[in-house]
Image (cartoon, rainbow, N blue to C red):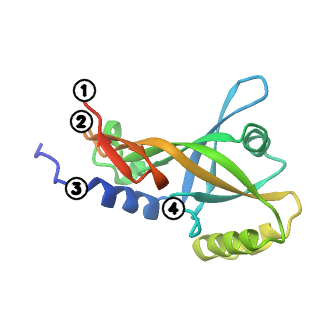
């Protein structure tokens, strides 16, 4: 197997954010039990690195997100395109969750970003009263681009990278 082609990690992170249309979410219930789920996302043009999600109030993960104000969000390379299943490219973020109120400029801009990325289904969902718009603001994270190629993410938008050593 040939060595991996060098990749600028910030460019790889941008590409991962562009290629992934949904984020895997890890939340916790009131009893502390973990739950995995997912939500389609769009980049928040108003806050570097933040992701916008439109989620149903009927979903348990929505209650977890709103109650705790915390989540882990992971973007991960599709299995079908990964060169090695054990070394899939991925970024995981520890996020602060912010609720964006309906009928605000933030709501209008956020829903428009989601519509631009995911199409007319968002037009239907935005009118359902149980749907909430949330902003996931990454505070720290990790970026993995394969075996032995990992970085700690920090700073505004998690755009500061520090190589992780073995």
Q: Answer with mark 3 or mark 1, whichever residue precedes in sequence.
A: 3
Q: Answer with mark 4 or mark 3, whichever residue precedes in sequence.
A: 3
Please give the label number shown on residue 148. 2
Q: Answer with mark 4 or mark 2, whichever residue precedes in sequence.
A: 4
Q: Secondary structure at mark 2?
A: loop
Q: Secondary structure at mark 3?
A: loop
- Residue at the (51%, 62%) spot, across then down: 48
Residue at mark 2 to residue at mark 1: CA–CA distance = 8 Å
Tell me, yes or no, whether the two marked residues, 2 and 1, touch with CB atoms within 8 Å: yes
Looking at this view, is 44 or 127 the one in front? 44
Q: Secondary structure at mark 1?
A: loop
The residue carrying mark 4 is 48
Left or right: residue 73 compared with residue 127: left
- Residue at the (59%, 51%) spot, across then down: 137
Residue at mark 4 to residue at mark 2: CA–CA distance = 27 Å
The residue carrying mark 3 is 7
Residue 87: x and y in percent read: 31, 40
Residue 58: x and y in percent read: 84, 48
Residue at mark 1 to residue at mark 4: CA–CA distance = 30 Å
Please tell me in which quadrant of the rendered image residue 118 appears: bottom right
The residue carrying mark 1 is 166
Please tell me in which quadrant of the rendered image residue 123 appears: bottom right
- Residue at the (48%, 42%) spot, across then down: 140
């Amino acid at each position: 197997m040939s060595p991996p082609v060098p990749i600028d990690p910030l460019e790889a992170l941008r590409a991962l954010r562009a290629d992934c249309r949904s984020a895997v979410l890890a939340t916790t219930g009131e009893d502390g039990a973990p739950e995995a789920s997912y939500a389609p996302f769009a980049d928040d043009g108003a806050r570097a690195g933040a992701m916008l999600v439109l989620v149903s109030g009927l979903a348990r993960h929505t209650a977890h997100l709103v109650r705790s104000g915390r989540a882990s969000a992971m973007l991960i390379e599709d299995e079908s395109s990964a060169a090695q299943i054990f070394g899939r490219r991925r970024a995981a973020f520890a996020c602060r969750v912010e609720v964006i109120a309906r009928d605000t400029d933030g709501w209008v801009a956020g829903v428009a970003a989601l519509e631009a990325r995911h199409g007319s289904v968002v037009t239907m969902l935005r009118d359902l009263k149980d749907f909430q718009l949330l902003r996931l603001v990454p505070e720290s994270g990790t970026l993995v681009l394969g075996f032995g190629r990992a970085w700690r993410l920090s700073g505004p938008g998690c755009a500061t990278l520090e190589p992780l050593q073995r």
